[in-house]
Amino acid sequence: MSYKRVNLVSSDVSVETLSALRRIIPEAFGENAIDWEKLRAVLGDTIDDRVEKFGFSWAGKGDAIKNVLLPSKATLRPSKEESVKFDESENLFIEGDNLEVLKLLQKAYFEKVKMIYIDPPYNTGGDFVYHDNFASPVKNYLQQTGQTDADGNRLQTNKETNGRFHSDWLSMMYPRLKLAWNLLRDDGVIAISIGDNEVHHLRVIMDELFGEENFEGHIHWRRRHNQPNDATKMIGLVAEHILVYAKNTVALKISGVGKVGLTGHFSNPDNDSRGDWASKPWKVGSGQSGSRYTITTPTGDVYDEEWMGEENTFKSLVDDSRIIFPNKGKGSPRKKYFKSEREEEGQSATNWWNHEQFGSNQDGSNLLFKIFGVKDVFDNPKPNELIENLISLSNIQDDDIVLDFFGGSGTTAHAVLNLSQDREKKINFIVVQLPELLDENNKEQVAGYNFCKSIGNPTTIAEITKERIRRVIAGYGDEPKPMNDGFKVFKLGESNYPENQFEFDPEKSEAENMKAFGEYLAKAKQVSLFDEVNTLDVIYENIVKEGFSLNASVEKSSIAGNIVWKVSDGEKQFQICLEKTIANEVVRTLTDADYKGKTFICFDSALDDTAKANLCLNIDLKTI
Ligand SMILES: C[S@@+](CC[C@H](N)C(=O)[O-])C[C@H]1O[C@@H](n2cnc3c(N)ncnc32)[C@H](O)[C@@H]1O
């Protein structure tokens, strides 16, 4: 009889790396492991044996590399009440530590993501930097985010006086970037915002993880228009950095590189017979050259600027009803472009992005004020224009996925919702954000803290992210524009399976631990931890661990009076029944030809040995 246990953990990256290596160099494998000497022989001269070689290291790098390989035992629990249109939308918001979440997404989203944007803590000396704990990652997560009673161990500021100031930040980033690399498609792009403190280190680890041949550029973004008043430095800080890498620069160029400057939204307020249009400034951006002449608007305002084209071109565009003057005829002229012209109308990106075209932090803050009606709910949010342009630059297409695993106030989610509105099929986001506790005694967080309280929610950053997404979908501001869209909320949590909840005691020997584990399991079975099971939670733990998409469809049906859930993700499918005892009738039905070869999951104790033996002849049986 051959039936398996369900997968208890997320996919094991080391097993997958080995099988990929085995596919390309089968001769380097002995029985089930790499034969080092054979591998050396195959690789020949390319092995670098020198003691002194180029490389970048820090205290803890070895552990950071090992951390990537440890599968996650945790799970993701759906929260329908916090979602909007849970059953229709394919946008995902996941509340949790992004390392565990990225591990749980590895199988389902391996090489599926087109674009990743992240804006991690810059390590300025005042940031919280999450501390990973390899031994009990979920417990550590619950403690650091104040979800357990234990105090100690809460998120701590990484101060410059910490002897491992840079090392701790690098150890936090490295495994996350490696897991992000796995998720990117071959023609995928990653853009990372970063400040002066870590940009040089980030560049080196990105070269290591992505390959320096895939470095696409280093954008300097002027994030503020006014002069800073920090007198401690000779050079005023007005710009920050965005590093852009391709997963595979050749594949990216073949699939096509996107353009910037096209963040408008299509509509047809003047009933133009050519259909929906958006507009872009006729004035050139700073740093670009154009033609200088004066333009007088319908209200008589005069603009003397550098423009995108010659005066004759401008006149013919006016004759062709292609120029609009916003702000009731007072504003600087803009050129219309139609949906079909979307691609040609963009401009190639340079490594200098100014706040006029790509927005400033102040623009980000003003937008949040409009959405929440309260000032400073989140410190230094990115402006939508910046993220929308970075996403467009990746040559995003309908149905593509954009991932941001340092979600903050949800700017990436907002940008994706905006970019989706004019498309046949939507672009979808996956945004991850830690429920980082807001501190009412911190001047940068007190407004966010008070806001969460005022709407009766827990006082965490994740609550701000979710509330922003809900408000953007519902419509906000003086002229609300509700969107026909939604998002699913999931939360990182402890596994539903007793095996995964047992904690090994590092003080005890392996034999003592195994004995304790055996006793624990026997007891867990007796009291049946599944007595009060939340069906949907267990279904989703299987979805995650079997490597199905979180957008898999979950349908309730019944076989011979027992409730059976059918989970489908494209071609892949499994059925799951969480009854304590499975009726003989159901077993008989499952031996029908209709179920041949299909996966069926149930509690181990719900079937006797004869039923298991019969089922194994027909179906792929997995037990919990
Ligand atoms: C600089 S902010 C991102 C701001 C965002 N781009 C915006 O426009 O609002 C970085 C965010 O990452 C979150 N974060 C830090 N460590 C994390 C972790 N381990 N998992 C998930 N989120 C984390 C922080 O709580 C913070 O909100």
Image (cartoon, rainbow, N blue to C red):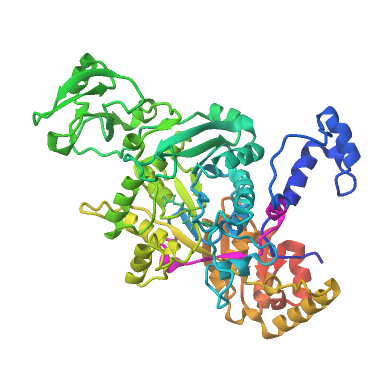
Q: Foreground: 378 or 257?
A: 378
**Residue 188 percent coordinates (x, y):** 55, 38
**Residue 518 percent coordinates (x, y):** 79, 78
391 relative to 74 in the view: left or right? left
Q: Does the magenta stretch include residue 73?
A: yes
107 relative to 40 in the view: left or right? left
**Residue 321 percent coordinates (x, y):** 19, 26
The C terminus is located in which quarter? Answer: bottom right
* Residue 84 visible at all: no
Q: Which residue is drawn at 61% across and 82% down?
A: 531
**Residue that protrudes farthest toward the left in the picture:** 300
| Residue 567 to residue 393: above or below | below
Range covered by the magenta-colored residues: 63-87
**Residue 46 percent coordinates (x, y):** 81, 29
* Residue 56 visible at all: yes
Q: Foreground: 466 or 535?
A: 466
The N terminus is located in which quarter? Answer: bottom right
